[in-house]
Image: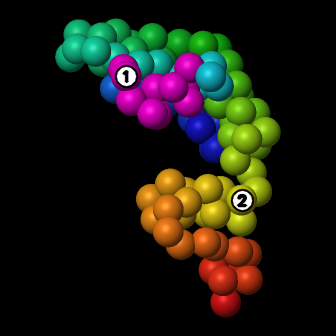
């Protein structure tokens, strides 16, 4: 979504939650829904709208790379603290 590209993600996933919150993508539950999503994104205006909404969401919530790395590290490695100095060196 960061590059104004809409996403197509499995329903019920964390990615689907972000895509929904952003209005930046489509979720699917079945192969047929995946195909429907791909066909829907062939519409230039629709694809552009989802892409711009997704980019706006990412910039509003994930643009600070230091913060993003710290949050992901806390999620994946909860016993390790990360500061900007510890990962920029």
Q: Residue furthest front?
A: 79
**Residue 14 placement, left or right of 47:** left
Query: Residue 7, position in %: x, y?
Result: 48, 31
Give the residue at mark 1. Answer: 12
Secondary structure of the residue carrying numbered label 2: helix
Q: Is residue 65 above or below residue 4?
A: below
How far separated are the C-alphas under marks 2 and 1?
25 Å
Q: Residue furthest left?
A: 31
Give the residue at mark 2. Answer: 67
Q: Are marks 2 and 1 in contact (CB under 8 Å)?
A: no
Q: Earlier in the sequence, mark 2 or mark 1?
A: 1
Secondary structure of the residue carrying numbered label 1: loop
Name the colouring of the figure. Answer: rainbow
Residue range in magenta is 11-20
Residue at image x 41%, y 19%?
A: 27
Residue 89 magenta-highlighted? no
Residue 19 magenta-highlighted? yes
CA neighbours of label 2 inside 10 A, class few (<14), some (14 to 19), many (20+): some
Q: What is the chief secondary structure element of the magenta stretch?
A: helix
Is residue 44 in view from this perspective?
A: no
């Amino acid at each position: 979504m960061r590059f104004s590209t809409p996403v197509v993600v499995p329903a019920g996933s964390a990615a689907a939650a972000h895509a929904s919150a952003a209005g930046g993508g489509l979720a699917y539950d079945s192969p047929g829904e995946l195909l429907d999503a791909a066909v829907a994104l062939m519409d230039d205006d629709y694809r552009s709208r989802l892409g711009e909404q997704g980019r706006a969401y990412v910039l509003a919530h994930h643009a600070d790379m230091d913060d993003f790395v710290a949050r992901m590290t806390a999620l994946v490695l909860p016993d390790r603290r990360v500061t900007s100095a510890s990962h920029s060196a």
